[in-house]
Amino acid sequence: MAFSKIWYTVALGLLLPFSYAHTDFFTSIGHMTDLINTEKDLVVSLKDYIKAEESKLEQIKKWAEKLDQLTDTATKDPEGFLGHPVNAFKLMKRLNTEWGELESLVLKDMSDGFISNMTIQRQFFPNDEDQTGAAKALLRLQDTYNLDTDTLSRGNLPAEDCFELGKIAYTEADYYHTELWMEQALKQLDEGEVSSADKVYILDYLSYAVYQQGDLGKAMMLTKRLLELDPEHQRANGNMKYFEYIMAKEKETNKSSTDSEGQMEKETEVKKKDYLPERRKYEMLCRGEGLKMTPRRQKRLFCRYYDGNRNPRYILGPVKQEDEWDKPRIVRFLDIISDEEIETVKELAKPRLSRATVHDPETGKLTTAHYRVSKSAWLSGYESPVVSRINTRIQDLTGLDVSTAEELQVANYGVGGQYEPHFDFGRKDEPDAFKELGTGNRIATWLFYMSDVSAGGATVFPEVGASVWPKKGTAVFWYNLFPSGEGDYSTRHAACPVLVGNKWVSNKWLHERGQEFRRPCTLSELE
C-alpha cells in the first residue's frame, strides 16, 4: 500500500503539469508519442527512487548490524561495558546525535509505529549536555592519568569522534586539548581512515588553537596546508595575512627585547603551571605516584583481628583490620560487607540516584558542583533490615553512636567520575555547614567499597600522600576531628576519576552529638 501511494505521488507530480496543458491525447498520435517519452522519464525516475531507497536501506542494515553486535556485547555486562570511558562517551554520542540522523533517514519510509515510538523514546535520550559531559570526562582522564591521545583513540575513537572531542574542548576555550584531539583526527585521516570528518574543518580549528597557544610558525604551516585544500577559504586567507603581518613585525623588533619578553612569557607559563600544586599532587597520587611512606613508618602499620573493643558480637568472630596510614590514622576493614548486602543496597539506591551534591559554605545548603561527578542516593535504616544491620555494624566497630549520623549515602561514579579534594567536616569559616541537622560537626567517616575498579578510582589524601585503592567488600574509617573537636586538616581527600570500570561506594558520616562519653574531649587541641 505504501509503495502504491509513493508511485501515485511520483506519477502525479510528474504528469499533472503536462496533463493540464494537454487533456485530449487520444485525438493525436503525435501527442500520444510524447507520453511514451514521459513514461520513459517516469521509469528512469522510479529506478532512481528505488536506488535511493535501496541505498538508504543498505545504510540502515549496516547500522543495525553494527548496533546489534554492539548491544549484544553491552547487555552481557552493562556496568562493565560502561566502565570504559570511551564506551560511555560513544553511547552518549550515539543516542544524542547518531540516532537522530537515523530517524531523519528513515522518517518518510518507516511505519508510523516506529516513528511514534522513536519520538516518545527520544525524550528520554541523553542530550547535548550529556555528550559534552562525557567528552569532558575523557579530557579529564587524559590529564589525570597522562594518557597518550593516540593510544586512547586508536581502535575505539574514529577520526570524527576525535574531531568532536576537539570541538568540545574548543567551545570551552581549552586550546591545549583542542590541539591534541584535532591533531589526532588529522593523523588518522592522513593514515587513510575513511571518515565523514573533513580535513579543512579540522585544520581550521587546529591552526587557531595552535595560534592561541603562541606557536605562530606552526599556525602558519597549518593554515598553508588548509589553503592547499581550499584556496578560497575566506577565514584562512584572512588569518594568513594577519600571521604574516605579525611575523614581519616580530622580525623588526629588537632581539634583546624579544629575548626578555620570551623569558617573561616562560616565567608566566611556569607560574601558571605552579598555581595549583595540590592538583598536581592529587593527580600523581591517582596514578600511584607521589609521596611514599618511609620504611620506618611503614613498620608501624599492622594487620590484626579486631573485636570492636570486646563487643559481644565480635568476641568469637572478630573482623580483619589493617592499617592503611598512620597520620591521619586510616584503617581498612576486610570482608566487612557481603556480596548479597551490596546487591541489596545497590537495588535500593538505583531508583533514587540523582546528581550528587555538596554543601555550599555561603548558604549552608546542598548544591551540585562540577568538581563532584557522580550520582548518589540516601538510605534509612528503617526501610530495610540490611541497611539497619549495616548501621549497627558501623556502630559496633567504631564505638560511635550512629543515631545522630547521617543516612547511608550510596554513590555511583560514571565516566570519569570523581570528587576533587575536599574536607568532610565543616571548617571554622563554615559555622552553619550542618546547622540544620543539629548534631554538630562530622566527627568521622566510614566508607564502604562496593565494587572493584579496573583502573583509577582511588581515595587519595594529598596533604599526606596516602592512596587507598578500592577493594570490593572492604571499608575504610578515619576521624575528621581531633578529640578536642578541632578539624584535622590532614584528612583532606579526593575520589580519583574512574579510568576503567564502575565504582560503587557507600559512606556513613558520624556526627559529634552522642559521642560525648564514647570519645571524650581532650585538653590538647591536636592530641
Image: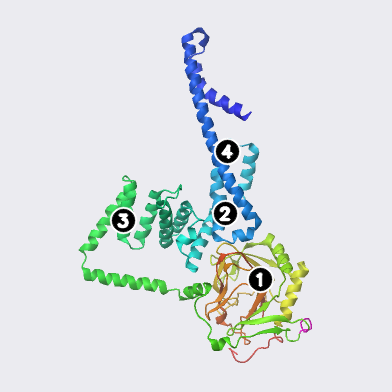
User: Residue under circle 2?
Assistant: 91
Ranked by sequence position, the earlier of labels 2 and 1 is 2
Ranked by sequence position, the earlier of labels 1 and 4 is 4
- x then y, percent, for residue 442: 64, 78
**Most foreground residue, 313 or 18:** 313
Image quadrant for the N terminus? top right
Local secondary structure at mark 4: loop
Instruction: Give me the disc on residue 472.
Output: 1
* Circle nearer the viewer, 2 or 4: 2
218, above or below 32, in the image: below
**Most foreground residue, 283 or 425:** 283
> Disc 1, disc 3: CB below 8 Å?
no
Instruction: Give me the disc on residue 221.
Output: 3
Q: CA distance from mark 1 to mark 4?
A: 47 Å
Identify the magenta region: 311-315
- x then y, percent, for residue 383: 76, 67
Q: CA distance from mark 2 to mark 4?
A: 22 Å
Q: Quadrant of residue 277?
A: bottom left
